[in-house]
Image (cartoon, rainbow, N blue to C red):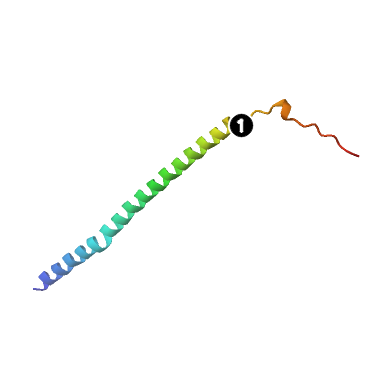
Amino acid sequence: MVKIIIELFVFYFIYKLIFEFIIPVYKATKQMKRKMNEFQDQMNQNNQFETHQTNKTTQQEPKKDSSDYIEYEEIK
């Protein structure tokens, strides 16, 4: 009778360990990895967008025309 009670207690302990500790930790770890991957993807997209915008602005700089130059004369 005592052996059955001990076995039931052990099975109950293993059940509680698995379903209240191991599975939630596994799910949380999996969710954190997914969130980190999403964050890294978002950062990569932002970097690509910024690089693209920077390249666009450097290519579209207006060329200075010599007629736009106003000569400055210092007054003493």
Q: Residue at x 50, y 35 (%)?
A: 52
Q: Is residue 59 left or right of residue 76?
A: left
Q: Eyeballing the image, is 27 above or below 3?
A: above
* Residue 62 shown left or right of residue 27 in the figure: right
| Residue 51 place in picture, x, y as percent | 51, 36
Name the side, left or right, on which 7 lies relative to 52.
left
The residue at the far bottom in this view is: 2
> Quarter of the image containing the N terminus?
bottom left
Q: Nearer the viewer, residue 38 or 56?
A: 56
Indicate left or right for 21 with 44 as reference.
left
Q: How far across and down, in percent of the image, does residue 6 sit?
A: 15, 70
Say what amino acid the circle numbered 1 marks.
Answer: Glu
Q: What is the quadrant of residue 65 in the picture?
A: top right
Q: In front: 71, or 20?
A: 71
The residue at the far front in this view is: 67
Q: Residue furthest right?
A: 76
- Residue at position x 25%, y 63% from top? 20
Nearest the eye: 64 or 28: 64
Q: Is residue 62 above or below residue 45?
A: above
Tally the marks.
1
Q: Is 43 in front, or is 68?
A: 68
Residue beneath the point at 73% across and 27% down = 67
Image location of residue 3, percent across then percent down? 11, 70
Residue at 19%, 63% in the rendered image: 15
Residue placed farthest to the top in the image? 66
Neighbor class of circle 1 (other Cα within 10 Å; few <14, some 14-19, many 20+) is few
Taking 42 as reference, is 11 above or below it? Answer: below
- Give the residue at mark 1: 61
Location of the C terminus by quadrant is top right
- Per the image, label 1 sits on a secondary structure element best described as loop
- Quadrant housing residue 7: bottom left
